[in-house]
Amino acid sequence: MIIHLNKNIPDTEIQSLAAATKSTWFRSRKDDIPILVTYSSVKELPEILVDKTISHYITDSDMQLSSRRYRKETREIKIGEIAIGGNNKNTLVITGPCSVESEEQITQSAELCIALGVKVLRAGCYKPRTSPYSFQGMGIDGLKLLDKMRNTYGLKIITEVRDSTHVQEVISYTDIVQIGAKSMYDHGILKACGKAQKPILLKRGFGTTLQEFVQASEFILSAGNEDVILCERGIRTFETKTRFTFDLCGVTWLKQFTNLPLILDPSHAIGYNYGVSDLSRASAAMGIEGLLIETHPNPKVAMSDAAQQLNHEQFTALYASLKKVAEAVDRVLI
């Protein structure tokens, strides 16, 4: 159950009420309402809260704050002057290389964004690689290069946090914090991002059910950060001809039952650049809130995920076609 309390109740009293009802609590940053979240098995308002409650919402599972039973509309999330979700029809395109590799490379990527009108640049600085011998990212030096691109070109920046040792660095240098598939269960990261005052993009783990995915978002939401975006990037199945299986059925379920904006990542799903454009267009046709597409000035020399990245010419052609697909489903590509 989700319980909205009266605004004038002091935090010390809310803490006592939360302890008495075994609830999690936070104060909404958007409207200053204290919110208690009890176990979903609670179906009646606790007696001690009856005269202190504005409204309450009964849910059928521990996917509570993210549920359309709680909020029918998709949450609006603002990234500077950009907005997704809510009543607008925007589909946000995010692009850039898998990893920051040099100032020249990331500058070329930023200039591609400016040339096409793409507003958000992505690139990894801390890379959670499967092999310890693979490129691990430039770390803080990469973050500083992304910050330079932001200051020089006015772009918004998204990059991934790998573990809790550098989560504050990533938060301070970026506009959107990405929690990658391999970090989805890291409670240190989830809780730190819950306290952050920036949008969080949470990627689905490649062996994660939809319920596990959404419940991970609840750790961020229940810690007070109401700006969470879900990202589908493919799951591991029996298939071996593609890197992962892009779960568009799961995307349909998330659209139907959750109130969180959805961004899709076809690059990581298929793992090969020949299929990225088709999957991007299919994703845009679903009327989702955004796309994350990897590009590189010269994918052949990329230091990570070379096979899945589009070159700039390929991405330019794809971007033009995505505008038409978005228009066909009453969306606006931004």
Image: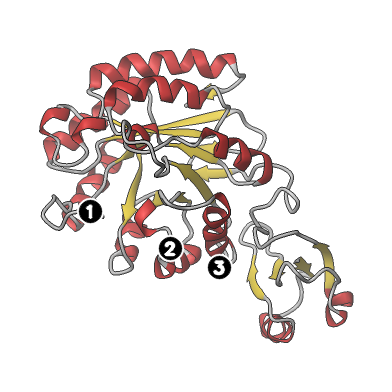
Q: Residues within 10 Å of mark 2 (few under 14, many from 20)?
A: some
- Disc 1 versus disc 3: distance between alpha carbons? 30 Å
**Element at label 1:** loop
Nearest the viewer among 53 and 211 is 211
| Percent coordinates x, y for residue 255 in the rendering | 63, 38
Q: Is residue 225 above or below residue 314?
A: below
Q: Which mark is residue 223?
A: 3
Q: Earlier in the sequence, mark 2 or mark 3?
A: 2
Q: Residues within 10 Å of mark 1 (few under 14, many from 20)?
A: few
Contact? badges 2 and 1 (CB < 8 Å): no
Could you tell me the amino acid type at mark 1? Thr
Could you tell me the amino acid type at mark 2? Tyr
* Residue 320 visible within the image: yes
Q: Quadrant of residue 19?
A: bottom right
Q: From the viewer's perspective, tell me whether residue 190 is left or right of residue 97.
A: right
Which residue bears the numbered disc 2? 185
- Closer to the observer: label 2 or label 3? 2
Could you tell me the amino acid type at mark 3? Ala
Q: Is residue 25 above or below residue 299?
A: below
Which residue bears the numbered disc 1? 130
